[in-house]
């Protein structure tokens, strides 16, 4: 370790998000002396402080509001909801504060020291931290784990220094409920936050430059969501581009180019949600041998080890997919490698969930990926209209889809759209990871009436006929 450091530790973790703090905790549990450098006000990273958790709290409220409107079809009518933004923000912040406080307590119980500040490599064995109090400290280490995360990507053409033009962080602040909101980008962040604002009363317009919402997601799963969003959003414009944004006293004027789209429209607020970029700037990589790929991710192997054998990279900074649960798994792999234990990131089923209403979730191989790879597959689909539980919930738009190896019957991928899809996908992940075959899923008793039965019946369809659906045999 460097002799110029003011103090030494076994492992320094740069970043306190869903990759960083699990890495620090796991390392401490294994007996290492750990210092976690965290530049946020509280641990938890983007996910907990201004991403996954606060957005899901707001989406829960949005779903409740929507149900008060839909319930009239079931014979129960509510008055129009009154929105108290102060209380809504208070609820969101309470959720975040409780969870960040819990992480702090767990860190203390494990003797993980949290240093609040921005960490950068001074050399390959020293991290220099500029603390929040303005002081600087050098920390020498045997091992380092880089978990610096990512930030919203805002192209220069949209970076106009106007508070009415927001990224996801700004949208979560809920400064007000704009009468008209433009969402630039039809990915999961844009659709989730668009759903929140639509439920609160905004007229939401989504502009997506590709031919479909949620590019990369299975089209069978997207269709029911898009149909529902078309009812709650003011407009969804596909194959459309936002050429320019112009702040005016009357609002943000957007110049749009696309077939059948009014070329100039004015909005009260604009949400830019076109992706995220890895946080690789200013962290001193030039003082190490660490390398970046063409997209700015730190290159690493299946043990999360970088070009410096004692430095590891995990989470968003380590590559796609940029998902919190993937970062947490990588944290375990990195620490186990440091501890000399057999470890490798060899997971083949990283679930993806879009927390809209209905939710989308998938894992393993998608139908398009199976085609691209030339796999010999059979695909079964079980529509939720045939599910007793979906009928009782008045949510029959869902679909459960399984991709099987045609000869062996092995489950290669699972896709679900519908109420609670994010919870249901766990069974799909287990099936793919454990190399389950159709019989394993179909012959495992699923509770009735539940939405999980749709997985069982989708598997039954591969073997012959599902109980609650009949498919004529092909001649």
Image (tube, rainbow, N blue to C red):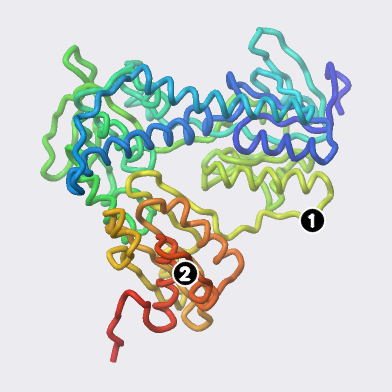
Visible residue check, residue 257: no
Q: Is residue 95 left or right of residue 136?
A: left
Figure check: 269 above or below 131: below
Q: Which residue shows up at 33% across the image and 16% down it? A: 163
For disc 1, the marked residue is: 342
Q: State the image coordinates of residue 20 (x, y, percent, origin top left).
A: 66, 34
- Helix, strand or loop for disc 1: loop
Give percent across and percent down for residue 350.
54, 54
The foreground one among 236 and 392 is 392
Label 1 packing within 10 angstroms: few (<14), some (14-19), many (20+):
few
- Where residue 222 appears, x then y in whole percent? 31, 54
> What label does residue 373 carry, if any?
2
Q: Secondary structure at mark 2?
A: loop
* Quarter occupied by residue 185: top left
Furthest residue in direction top, as rendered: 134
Q: Residue at x 52, y 61 (%)?
A: 427
Task: Identify whether 334 is placed above or below 202.
Answer: below
Which residue ends up furthest to the bottom in the rendered image?
A: 475
Up/down of 464 relative to 384, above or below: below
Locate the N terminus and report the quarter of the image it occupies: top right
Disc 2 crowd rating (10 Å Cα; few below 14, some 14-19, many 20+) is: few
Which of the pair 294/454 is nearer the observer? 454
Q: Position of residue 418 (x, y in %)?
A: 35, 54
For the residues labelled 2 and 1, the Cα–Cα distance comes to 30 Å
Residue occupying the point 41% across, 61% down = 450
> Of circles 2 and 1, which is in front?
1
């Amino acid at each position: 370790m460097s002799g110029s450091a003011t103090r030494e530790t076994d492992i320094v973790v740069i970043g306190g998000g869903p990759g960083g703090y699990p890495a620090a905790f796991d390392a401490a549990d294994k007996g290492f002396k750990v210092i976690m450098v965290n530049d946020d006000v509280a641990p938890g990273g983007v996910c907990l402080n201004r991403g996954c958790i606060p957005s899901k709290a707001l989406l829960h409220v949005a779903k409740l509001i929507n149900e008060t409107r839909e319930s009239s079809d079931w014979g129960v009518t509510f008055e129009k909801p009154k929105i108290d933004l102060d209380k809504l923000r208070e609820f969101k912040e309470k959720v975040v504060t409780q969870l960040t406080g819990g992480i702090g307590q767990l860190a203390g119980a494990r003797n993980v020291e949290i240093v609040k500040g921005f960490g950068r490599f001074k050399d390959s064995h020293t991290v220099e931290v500029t603390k929040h109090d303005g002081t600087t400290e050098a920390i020498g280490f045997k091992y380092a784990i880089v978990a610096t995360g990512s930030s919203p990507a805002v192209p220069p053409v949209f970076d106009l220094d106007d508070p009415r033009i927001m990224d996801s962080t700004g949208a979560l602040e809920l400064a007000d409920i704009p009468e008209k909101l433009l969402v630039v980008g039809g990915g999961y962040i844009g659709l989730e936050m668009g759903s929140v604002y639509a439920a609160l009363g905004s007229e939401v317009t989504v502009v997506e430059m590709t031919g479909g919402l949620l590019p990369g997601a299975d089209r069978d799963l997207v269709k029911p969501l898009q149909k529902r969003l078309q009812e709650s959003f003011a407009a969804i414009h596909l194959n459309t581009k936002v050429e320019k944004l112009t702040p005016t006293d009357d609002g943000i004027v957007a110049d749009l180019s696309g077939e059948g789209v009014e070329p100039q429209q004015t909005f009260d607020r604009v949400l830019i949600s076109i992706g995220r970029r890895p946080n690789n700037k200013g962290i001193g990589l030039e003082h190490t041998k660490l390398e970046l790929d063409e997209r700015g991710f730190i290159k690493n192997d299946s043990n999360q080890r970088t070009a410096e054998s004692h430095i590891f990279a995990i989470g968003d900074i380590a590559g796609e997919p940029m998902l919190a649960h993937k970062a947490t798994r990588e944290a375990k792999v990195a620490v186990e490698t440091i501890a000399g234990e057999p470890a490798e990131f060899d997971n083949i089923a990283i679930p993806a969930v879009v927390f809209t209403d209905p939710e989308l979730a998938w894992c393993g191989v998608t139908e398009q990926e199976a085609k691209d790879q030339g796999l010999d597959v059979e695909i079964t689909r079980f529509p939720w209209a045939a599910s007793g539980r979906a009928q009782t919930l008045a949510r029959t738009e869902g679909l459960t889809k399984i991709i099987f190896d045609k000869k062996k019957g092995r489950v290669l991928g699972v896709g679900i759209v519908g109420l609670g899809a994010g919870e249901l996908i766990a069974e799909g992940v287990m099936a793919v990871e454990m190399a389950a075959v159709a019989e394993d899923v179909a012959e495992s008793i699923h509770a009735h009436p539940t939405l999980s039965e749709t997985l069982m019946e989708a598997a039954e369809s591969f073997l012959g006929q599902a109980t609650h659906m009949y498919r004529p045999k092909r001649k």
